[in-house]
Amino acid sequence: MITIRFFEEEDAKLFDEYLKEQDMDKLNFGWKLDGNDIEIQFEDIMEPMRYFRKFALKYGRLPKTVIF
């Protein structure tokens, strides 16, 4: 499990909404939004990171985050 902490709560909500728009059958991980944090449970670390990269490309910026 990892936690992505967004500096801005709006960015966390936007990423949560972006994930909800995706085909749930293709997502190989689960997540939970908690304020500025999104906790992600996964088997392959690259899977959620691919969606984070696609999110950044869609919105034309990479939100300020800390991943732990």
Image (cartoon, grey):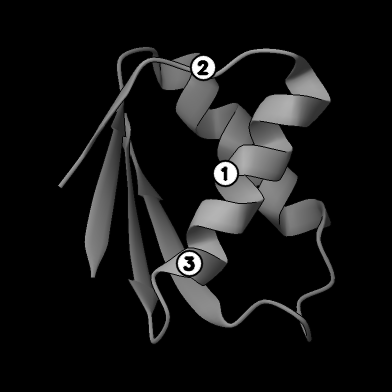
Q: Earlier in the sequence, mark 1 or mark 2?
A: 2
What is the x, y in percent for residue 55? Answer: 69, 36
Q: Mark 2 points at which residue?
A: 10
Q: What residue appears at the point 30 percent right and 14 percent down from the top-left corner?
A: 7
Between the C-alphas of marks 3 and 2, the distance is: 24 Å
Question: SS for tag 3?
Answer: helix
Residue 52, numbered label = 1
- Nearest-to-viewer mark from 3 and 2: 3
Q: Are marks 1 and 2 in contact (CB under 8 Å)?
A: no
Classify 28 as above or below 66: below
The one nearer the camera, 62 or 7, is 62
Q: What residue appears at the point 40 percent right and 59 percent down from the top-left corner?
A: 32
Give the quarter of the image for residue 42: bottom left
User: Is residue 13 left or right of 40 when viewed as pictured?
Assistant: right
Classify 17 as above or below 45: above
- How crowded pointer 2 is (Cα within 10 Å; few <14, some 14-19, many 20+) is rated as few
Q: What residue appears at the point 78 percent right and 86 percent down from the top-left corner?
A: 25
Residue 46, numbered label = 3
Three-letter residue code for mark 1: Phe
The N terminus: image quadrant: bottom left
User: Is residue 24 left or right of 30 when viewed as pictured?
Assistant: right
The one nearer the camera, 9 or 41, is 41
Q: Which of marks 1 and 3 is nearer the N terminus?
A: 3
